[in-house]
Image (cartoon, helix red, strand yellow):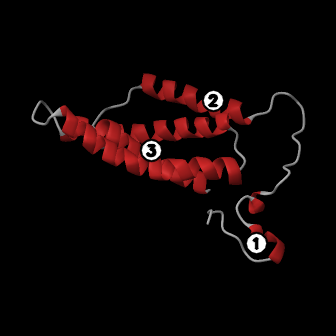
Amino acid sequence: MWTILLLILSNVFMTFAWYGHLKWFKGDSHALWMIILISWSIALLEYCFMVPANRLGKELYKFDFAQLKTIQEIITLVVFAGFSIWFLNFKLGWNHVVAFACIAAAGFFVFHDFSGATKRPLEHSAATAYSPAIDTGKESSPWPK
């Protein structure tokens, strides 16, 4: 699914922008304004993946806002855990794993409908979200033109 892939890429850049400088620029050898500019430039790449991920998730895959945010947070934790172990050489303890699992459990609750009501069918299918070519029988792309 495009939303998940783009969110993973976005989070890789975000994690490097937020935490990479802590390993790359140790001590006072670099001015803070320089580190901020470097982090902002990395974060720009994050937004280049995040914005399309959220648009596709909302318009094409019909996730609601809470679902998009929950997916984002779960992916953030998975990417951060890997980054912490691999890049920062940080050892996660059992308490970190339990805390991350509690947040991941939010995914169950945000995607589960406890109301018992059946969902109404979508007025527009995902295929028509971006493509007027649906009436002509041509194959369409999920990406806007």
Q: Is residue 61 left or right of residue 113?
A: left
> Residue 22's quadrant in the figure?
top left
Reading the image, the residue beneath label 2 is 106
> Residue 20's quadrant in the figure?
top left
Reading the image, the residue beneath label 1 is 133
Mark 1 residue element: helix
Q: What residue do we see at 66% from left, 68% from top?
A: 141
Q: What residue do we see at 52% from left, 53% from top?
A: 6
The picture places residue 34, in percent across and down from the top left corner, at 20, 39
Mark 2 residue element: helix
Crowdedness near tag 2: few (<14), some (14–19) or many (≥20) residues, C-alpha within 10 Å: some
The picture places residue 143, in percent across and down from the top left corner, at 62, 63
- Quadrant into which the N terminus falls: bottom right
Q: Is residue 106 left or right of residue 138?
A: left
The amino acid type found where label 3 is placed reads Asn
Mark 3 residue element: helix
Residue 52 in the image: above or below residue 110: below
Q: What residue do we see at 73% from left, 58% from top?
A: 129
Marks 2 and 3: in contact by CB < 8 Å? no
Residue 30 in the image: above or below residue 44: above
